[in-house]
Image (cartoon, rainbow, N blue to C red):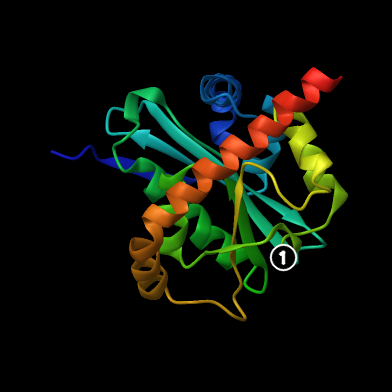
Amino acid sequence: MNQAFKVLVADSSYAGYASAICEEMAASAKARGTGIAKRTPEYLETKMQEGKAVIAFAEDGTWAGFCYIETWGHGEYVANSGLIVSPLFRKSGLAKQIKQKIFELSRQKYPEAKIFGLTTGLAVMKINSDLGYEPVTYSELTQDDNFWQGCKSCVNYDILMSKERKNCLCTAMLYDPQDHYTPAETQTDFKKKAKAYERLLNIKRLRLLGFKKKKKIIL
């Protein structure tokens, strides 16, 4: 039987969960061997106060997941950042529910904005495709320096900079409200190309990590 969750728009009343969320974000990034833009509990509290975050709970009230909205280029671009699901509830379908809720909130608050994300995971790519995102080049993302500064905490930041912010291990995906495919179209497309995407992710990982190791040896 599937676990039931409550996925809510967060407000200041949930600020007490900010520290635990930050700790889980850091632990998850370490376990994956990838980076994540580090945020303080105070930063997440601000997102909650502004109504720019969603938080999820299990039926018994246990905290289960979180995600928040970032804006770039004066609201031209929106990123759904910091997606995290508690280890207790992973592989339950909760990540998809959170992504759906934060996507709806983003569209409500910023109806004209392009919504984008960077991911190293095929599962997240699938969720994004279900929402109408499509893979794009890095050049189609915001060029706001403040966004890319957030990648400094990632272990692969040197790869990103060596490629002049045009490539890295992450796959870029974008939802453009002015020019996008319907979720049904992107779902079908993703199913057809899933294996190809997986191969490309593996090739990119091998090549870029190989480049990183080679660079360290030279240094």
Q: Nearer the viewer, residue 191 or 173?
A: 191
User: Residue 119 location, x and y as percent?
Assistant: 56, 45
User: Residue 196 location, x and y as percent?
Assistant: 43, 56
The mark total stands at 1
- Visible residue check, residue 39: no
Task: Please state if 161 lies on the left or on the right of 67 as rendered.
Answer: right
- Visible residue check, residue 138: yes
Please say if 148 is above or below 77: above
The structure residue drawn at horizontal position 33% and vertical position 62%, both measured from the top left corner, is 191
Q: Nearer the viewer, residue 45 or 210?
A: 210
The structure residue drawn at horizontal position 75% and vertical position 36%, both measured from the top left corner, is 159
Q: Quadrant of the N terminus?
A: top left
Label 1 crowd (10 A; few <14 / some 14-19 / many >=20): some
Q: Nearer the viewer, residue 215 or 46?
A: 215
In the picture as drawn, the residue positioned furthest to the bottom comes out as 178
Please say if 114 is above or below 87: below
The structure residue drawn at horizontal position 38% and vertical position 34%, both measured from the top left corner, is 57
Q: Nearer the viewer, residue 38 or 160?
A: 160
Element type at mark 1: helix
Residue that mark 1 sits on: 140
The structure residue drawn at horizontal position 84% and vertical position 48%, both measured from the top left corner, is 164
User: Residue 6 location, x and y as percent?
Assistant: 35, 42
The amino acid type of the residue labelled 1 equals Glu
User: Residue 129 location, x and y as percent?
Assistant: 44, 61
Q: Quadrant of the C terminus?
A: top right
Please say if 186 is above or below 22: below
